[in-house]
Amino acid sequence: MSEYTRKPWIRVGRIDEIPEDQALRLDTTPPVSVFRSDGEFFCVDDTCTHEDFSLADGWVEDGAVECPLHLAKFCLRTGAALATPACRPLATHEVRVDGADVYVRIERGGDDRVDGHCPGAIGSNAGRRDAEGAGHGMA
Amino acid sequence: MFDVTELVQPDQGLINPSIYTDPEVYQGELERVFARSWLFLAHDTQLAKPGSFVQTYMAEDPVLVVRQRDGSVKAFLNQCRHRGMRICRADEGVARAFTCTYHGWGYNLAGELVNVPMQDRAYHDEIDKSKWGPTQVPRLHNHKGFIFGTWDESAPAFEDYLGDMIWYFDALADRYDEGLTLVPGATKWVIDCNWKFAAEQFASDMYHVPSSHASALVALIEDPAVLAEFQEQSAAAPGRQYAGNGHGSGFGLRPDLVPTQAGPDFDAWVVANREQIYRRIGEHRALAVNGHNTVFPNFSWLTINNTMRVWHPRGPGQIEVWSWTYLPKDADERAKQAVRTSTIRTFSAAGVFETDDGENWTEIQQVLRGHQARKTTFNARMGLGHERHGTDGMPGRVTDDMYTEMAARGMYRRWADLMSGLSWPEITERDKSRQQREQEAHLA
């Protein structure tokens, strides 16, 4: 029995449920998604930091995901915002592949976002998201 | 307001040409004809994978036709509910979502509003997004790869709307085991004429061919002896025309599937697959149903010329033609190339036959600028009283000669019924009793 079958690990699904350049969303709060790009698996928060949209429905290419709504783009490895209108990063989470199964560990120990001075972020929902974050009991 | 009985008398074959020019009639058509009929939207092969979409039109209304993740198809008005901007400005592509370029409202593939920028700050989180999605096309039907839609919840089921026309349509739609594919992209052009000239000709008019296409025919057939043989054949087998529910199909009867207009490379494929075609649609139908067709109101094709099109209306005096070349999906490259080349040469924006047709229609439209011209009744009486039923075992009303205007009168019958504001059940009832009377008259 592997260590991944126990908490804090969550089983996402089988490898073949996540084809190349696709993602599988987990209905955690907030939701996270596991992406597969160039054969590698990545786990990041699922909701675009610019406007509400599920990045599992985004375009995956070369280790990045692009939100189809306004073309914000994020690095899947670091969560960094690579293209405006997003300017705050996505939280990243640990992924392990054990045999044919994919597991993730979600730890929200603190505010892991870069403090958001976001020039020209008139269209962002930064204020609301911070309020929500507080509601989820982040330290 | 117009009085339909003064505009057309379909049973007499009389047409008041103001139906081709009157802006009020045109607005009536948008509301009573196009918004109540089944319209062709897209072919399956245009929507290859989840997220594949095309933007087309239902008359003047832009609609997005989108392949869903589960393989089904949805269609909705390409109009943002905020200020009416086009939600998607591309003609076709693959999408994961659609975002209005004006203020950024975002929609998913099903056409549901999923994101409103600054929902908290600007709308105080008081907008119910589920109520502000674009207008959905409520009814879609996929007939053997051809996707149709209608706005009208009360319109007959697609099969009933087509009626016997299905048998003629399937001479194309059901012809090959592997089905059809389209040469990518629609060829689009504008003709300054009323949509009914085009739709009617493809429903009902083989009669124009020797005259309108004289120069094209000379270019194709130089040898008088070949032409003589052609004419003898035509006289010996005078062809047929079907009319029903406003639709029409007309064709000459051919002794063999080949030669086709596409030439030897395609003919070789047809000969190699002859048995397949006969098995699917029967030898009789395969040889006969090869000509011009219109599904009311504005979807037309020429079965063996490998061209189909929608005549999108653009005001009383203009149409946008969207035309596609179709191919047997599994034909070899040489055969496909032969079809592409011949269709471009004959039926395309600069095709030798196509330009003849457009020339006639724009000329008529020009003449109808005249006050006297618009008051002058048109004659659509060819073959009046010579309608038949079940000729050669073909379904529906079928004449024993392709030179007739039965299908034109049928088209204006359906047009008049819709324009009069009759309900669909009333129209169906009237059609039934008309047909009954006609059959009794023929038996008498």
Image: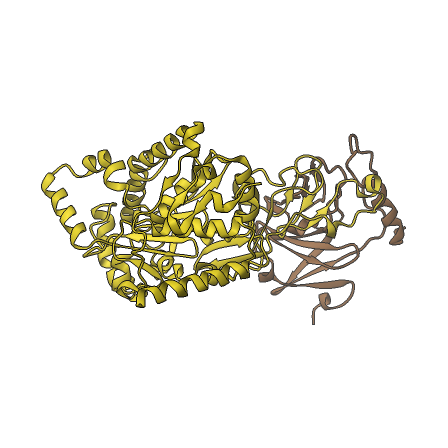
Chain colours: A brown, B yellow
Asked whether, in this view, residue B420 is left or right of residue B171, the answer is right
At 35% from the left edge and 45% from the top edge, which residue is drawn? B380
Query: In front: B288, or A14?
Result: B288
Q: How many marks?
A: 0
Q: Compared with residue B62, is residue B240 higher up or lower down, i.e. above or below?
A: below
Q: Give the quarter of the figure containing the N terminus of chain B.
A: top right
Quarter residue B173 falls in: bottom left
Residue in the picture at 78% in, 65% down:
A7
Judging depth in this view, the residue of B32 and B221 nearest the camera is: B32
Task: Report the side of B70 relative to B323 (left or right).
Answer: right
Residue B330 drawn at (x, y percent): 34, 55
Res A130 visible: yes
Give the quadrant of residue B387.
bottom left
Left or right, B418 with reference to B134: left
In the rendering, at what x and y percent does residue B308 appear?
38, 46
- In the rendered image, residue B147, in percent from the top left (x then y), is placed at 48, 54
